Image (cartoon, rainbow, N blue to C red):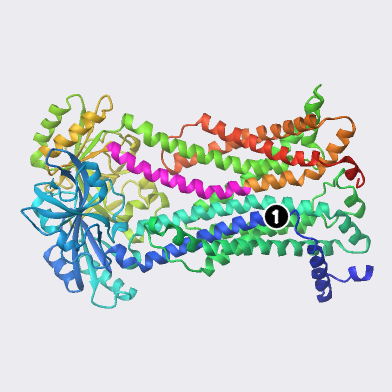
Amino acid sequence: MRERVRVGWRSPRGALLTLRLARRELRGGVRGFLVFLACIALGVGAIAGIGSSADSLAEGLAREGQVILGGDVAFSLIHREAGPAERAFLGTKGALSICATMRAMARTEDGRAALVEVKAVDDHYPLYGAVRLTRAGDLKTALTVRDGAFGAVAEPTLLARLGIPVGARLRVGSASIEIRAELLSEPDKLAAGIAFGPRLIVSDAALAASGLVQPGSLVRWSYRLRLNADPASARLTDALVAEARASFPDAGWDIRTRDNASPELGRNIRRFTQFLTLVGLTALLVGGVGVANAVKNYLDRKRDVIATLKALGATGARVFCIYLTEVMVLAGIGILIGLLIGAALPFVIVAAFAPLIPVPIVPALHPASLLLALVYGFLTALAFALWPLGRAHDLPVSALFRDTVAPTRALPRLRYIVASAATLAILAGFAVALAYDRRVAAVFVAAAAALFMVLRALALVVMIAARRVPRPRSSLLRLALADLHRPGALTPTIVLSLGVGLALLVALTEIDGNLRREFTAGLPERAPSFYFLDIQQAETARFDAFIRAHAPGARLERVPMLRGRIVSLHGTQAEAVRPSPDVAWVLHSDRGISDSATVPAGSRVVAGSWWAPDYTGPPLVSLEARIAAGLGLKLGDTIVVNVLGRNVAATVANLRAVDWETLGINFVLVFSPNTFRGAPHADIATLTYADGGNMAEESAMVSDAAAAFPTITTIRVKAVLDAVGALARQLMLAIRGASAITLVAAILVLGGALATGQRHRLYDAVVLKMLGASRRWLLGLYALEYLLLGLATGVFGVAAGSVAAGLVVSRVMDVAFVFLFGPALAVALSAVILTIVFGLVGAFVSLTQKPAEVLRHL
């Protein structure tokens, strides 16, 4: 046997011997590796499932691109319709459908009013897909003029909000509208963005009769094409886009193709996918602690076997290879389970939730996502197994036999340390290189590394403090403190596994609480009560008088507004600019712009100087400072904006800091007063009640304003906040659900760590019971030990989680952060209680063992 064990481990014969010994070891079962398998399967399943679901969603968006967009190519304009030459050009390329969207007020005959999202369509709509209605008949029939009223279809929420049935009549602007059916779905809804009111679809003739379309009105005109040529050819659609830009360079239209039907949705999906992937990686990293615990525990139970192998001549490298083979085989089993879960997730989502999901998902197997999850799983298992396996390489036989009571503190050989560090570096490199936003991924990797090191340092501090604290008189407290720093103490493992999960949970709780506070408590107290849109110049005096009469103590702020699209920045076309991710949205679509002789309220100049009130020179522009930094602009640079089909070049004269949280009127771009002189435009206004307003006076204002000014759109800010808050709550719900994966992994690791110490607890309990300790006294001892560990880790978790939440809320979400002591304390106490309960469950099992059975094996 001695000669067989001494066979060179690098030779083929040695490799076969290693595999044979590993196989024999595995015949004894995988006891102690259940947490290992669960952690690996959970993390790999999360990454594989997230990647597969995102790929299925992307494939669905690509496949349904025509339906989502409403055509093969769509050209959008704000404020103005396409000119005769532009329409003639589009008409030669295929079937053309025109629709207009805007916000307006719908009024019942008895004076009730509600904000609606109006979509006016022609007879060719929709080019792709179908509109689903509650009543028989098609959309074209429902929109015809009948009995002196234009037809319309509306979402059920509008009927419920106004308390009217199908067949009732409304006034929209100057037009009489009859609701002919309820709208169940529209094929191109995904491309519409956030809606602040229910959808109302009317004919283009109804929109023309309403009088809502005035110079400067906020109307978006969309021209959808079903191409005569092969629409699936990306080359042909790209050629059409290039021809349109070359033929009409100053058109200022936003052009989308079926391959890019909803760019913002695609970007948001990629961002959220990255976040969820990072959550999966966090679960894997937390699970890595479970891997290290399981390997250490397994080797601890195999001390006699390892000692026997070394006594028979096995080298440290042979022992390392045998147990590394076992660990990686078990990791492969966990990874396979995770891959099966991840591959099945898109199919499960479609089968269970297809009617509830507003986006198309095409379930399929996605080898790239599964391969990436496999690589992540193997790298994690290898990185966290190398250290405990490497430590067993150089342990002599004598040390192995006494390692329980006098563990050797030697580090593993340098090659194992280097291999472990290199594997972690490769894992981090994959996470950063494959991320949608590499900056965010790099911050995540750095934060994860820092968190692990800080938790390790915290465990060391707790052990040193427990060792050096004056010996208390209470034997219970004295033994509890000794347990924290004794050989084989669970302090490092419990602090690490509990600390990661607790910090994450506190961060999520703080973020959620701050968002709720911002959207439900803080903003309404200082925000305007109303926005008024599309105030025509001829109506401004009458409108101001109306507000003074109906809200004499309220503050009215009114400024001109246009919509413009940034064309170029300092000579570089907007499409070629690479802005920072947090400000890229400025270039994705048209933006609200204004001009002003004075610094707008809620702004302050932080660089440069404001122009004179009577300035008449070349156009100047003021930018929000953070946006300018993200776009790489500085004072003196040139920016070109397309407004109403004309390119306007302006020089950056100053930068402003803007207090967006007040929800007052402010703009990213504010131009000098002479820039748009003579251009048709409308005003936008806000109304702020001195006492914050109440439901009765706000409802009366909506009805009275809609009756007095049919073409002015009134938006209650609280309704907008409710809509945005609902989105925020849905996002936080998704984040909490995804982060539950990490929390489950942390609980598994915590349970595994406590199970690892059960053998030590068994020996301790037997000895103490032989010395007269009662079961109640022992349970009190273990409860006190876990309480001390939980409290130390809880303080850290609250601090680390609050810091992380503060950075996310203030730096990423641009919201004022407030430390929420109550929720954070509740989370910390829950974690402490969980630690005590888990620990006592394991301790109770140890206390049920009979002393004689244990003493025979000491």
Q: Is residue 658 visible?
A: no
Q: Is residue 828 above or below residue 152?
A: above
Drawn side of residue 807 relative to residue 843, left or right: left
What secondary structure is marked by label 1?
Answer: helix
- Image mark count: 1
Residue occupied by mark 1 = 34
Which of the pair 157/242 is nearer the observer? Answer: 157
Residue 847, given in percent of the width and then of the height, sits at: 80, 38
Which of the pair 456/42 is nearer the observer? Answer: 42
Drawn side of residue 639 relative to residue 533, left or right: right
Which of the pair 548/417 is nearer the observer? Answer: 548
User: In which quarter of the view is residue 470 placed?
Assistant: top right
Tell me, yes or no, whether the highlighted magenta stretch contains residue 725.
yes
Tell me, yes or no, whether the highlighted magenta stretch contains residue 494.
no
Q: Residue furthest bottom?
A: 229
User: In which quarter of the view is residue 716 placed?
Assistant: top left
Residue 517, given in percent of the width and then of the height, sits at: 41, 34
* Magenta-colored span: 717-745
Q: Is residue 138 above or below residue 111?
A: below
Q: Residue at point 35% right, 47% down?
A: 634
